[in-house]
Amino acid sequence: MRALIPRIPTGRGVAAATLATAAVSLSGCGFLMGNAFDIEVGECLASVPQDGEVFNVETIDCAETHEGEVYANVTLDDGDFPGVKKIEKTVDARCSEEFESFVGIGYNDSELEFTSLYPTEESWNTWDDRQVTCIIADPEGTTGSLKGAER
C-alpha cells in the first residue's frame, strides 16, 4: 500500500482522530473507508488525519457532521524526491494559495485550519506519487461544504 503523510502548518493545530487502515464501510453512520489517494475535491472526511502515514480515510456525506473537506489536489514537480522539508514548504505554500479561492478569505484571516496529505519517499519512488491533497478543517466540526464559507 502507498502512504501519505499529513502536515499541519506550524502554529495552528487541527483536532483529529487516528484513522484505521482497514477498508470497510460502516452502514448506519454513512462512513466509508476510502483510499487516501482517491479522495476528490469536495469530499468530506469524518475526521482529519493528525500525523503518520495514512492509507485510508473515512469519507462521509458533507450533510453529516464532519471535520474536514478536500479543497484542492495539486501535483508536485517530477524529479528526484526533494526531501520532506522541501515538500512541506512547497505544500504549505500551495495549499495556502488554494485556501483563499476555496473559502473566500485568506488563511491568516480565517478561523478554519488546513492540513495536507503528501507523498512519502517510498510512494514517490515506487508509485511515481506526486499528488498533494489539501484538506480544510473545522476543529469544532461542521455540516455542509466549507466552500465560500468566508470564515
Image (cartoon, grey):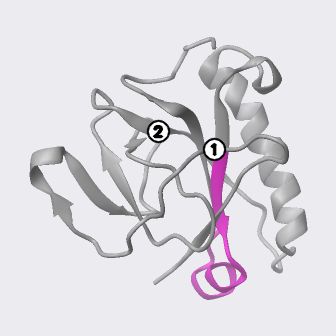
Dots 2, 1 in contact, CB < 8 A:
yes
N-terminal of the two: label 2 or label 1? 1
What residue is disc 2 on? 67
Q: What quarter of the picture does the C terminus occupy?
A: top right
Residue 31 x, y percent position in the rendering: 24, 50
- Which residue lies at the image location 46% right of the left edge and 72% below the top edge? 55
Q: Nearer the viewer, residue 35 or 129?
A: 35
- Which residue lies at the image location 82% right of the left edge and 75% below the top edge? 79
- Mark count: 2
Residue 145, above or below 127: above
- Amino acid type, callout 1: Val
Residue 57 x, y percent position in the rendering: 41, 59
Left or right, residue 56 beside residue 119: left
Disc 2 crowd rating (10 Å Cα; few below 14, some 14-19, many 20+) is: many
Left or right, residue 79 beside residue 139: right
Whether 76 is among the magenta residues is no
- Amino acid type, callout 2: Glu
The magenta span reads 115-131
- Which residue lies at the image location 84% right of the left edge and 48% below the top edge? 10
Q: What quarter of the picture does the N terminus occupy?
A: bottom left
User: Of helix, strand and loop, which one carries label 1?
Assistant: loop
Residue 147 x, y percent position in the rendering: 51, 21
What residue is disc 1 on? 14
Residue 134, above or below 123: above
Left or right, residue 95 beside residue 68: right
- Which residue lies at the image location 34% right of the left edge and 49% below the top edge? 59
Disc 1 crowd rating (10 Å Cα; few below 14, some 14-19, many 20+) is: many
